[in-house]
Image: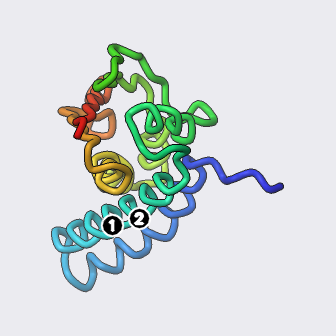
Amino acid sequence: MAQPIPIIERRRIEAELLKEVYETLIERVGREEAKSIITESVRRSSITQAAAFAAQAPGGTSLQSFIDIQSNWTAENALEIQPLHRDETHYDFNVTRCRYAEMYKKMGLGEIGGLLSCNRDGSFCEGYDPNLKMTRTQTIMEGASHCDFRYHYEKA
């Protein structure tokens, strides 16, 4: 059975194409509209991908099922995570190293790296489970020392 492609590699491949799309959009509609289009496209893609993960969650989605799939994003040391707090309804951690941000910057995509990756995090919750909410005030991609992820699961 073939192994699924690591998400960091998938994002690299997507970014190679999106770089060209972004540059074409800038030429045709300007930088701000190009960013808006990329933002909306990535958001929609994230929701669709999250729904696919949700459909595979044994017994349905929950905060625990979300935590269980986190290894998909950390594979190949793509993220270094500092756990902070976890209980039945909260999951808080900081990302102290982000190879996604490093990769986008190296590809010359630092300007839109946040749109290509960080933008996905909140919208992933929408597609995965509407009870899952994320708050984040800073990212490494934007120049912060760490990304502060705070998840809250609202029980029905």
For residue 35, above or below residue 12: below
Q: Nearer the viewer, residue 132 or 150?
A: 132
Q: Nearer the viewer, residue 93 or 11?
A: 93
Q: CA distance from mark 1 to mark 2?
A: 6 Å
Q: Residue shown at 32%/40% (left/top)? A: 141
Q: Nearer the viewer, residue 119 or 92?
A: 92
Q: Residue 155: image x %, image y %?
A: 24, 35
Q: From this viewpoint, which residue is outermost toward the bottom? A: 28
Q: Residue 10: image x %, image y %?
A: 57, 56
Q: Residue shown at 66%/53% (left/top)? A: 5
Q: Residue 123: image x %, image y %?
A: 29, 53
Numbered disc 2: secondary structure: helix
Name the amino acid type tagged 1: Arg
Q: Residue 149: image x %, image y %?
A: 30, 30
Q: From this viewpoint, which residue is outermost toward the right? A: 1
Residue bearing the label numbered 2: 48
Residue 26 in the figure: left or right of residue 67? left
Q: Residue shown at 34%/17% (left/top)? A: 87
Numbered disc 1: secondary structure: helix
In the rendered image, the quadrant that contains the C terminus is top left
Residue bearing the label numbered 1: 44
For residue 85, above or below residue 8: above
Q: Nearer the viewer, residue 121 or 113?
A: 121
10 Å neighbourhood of mark 2: few (<14), some, or many (≥20)?
some
Q: Quadrant of residue 150?
A: top left
10 Å neighbourhood of mark 1: few (<14), some, or many (≥20)?
some
Contact, CB < 8 Å: mark 1 with mark 2? Answer: yes
Q: Quadrant of residue 127?
A: bottom left
Image depth: mark 1 or mark 2 in front: 2
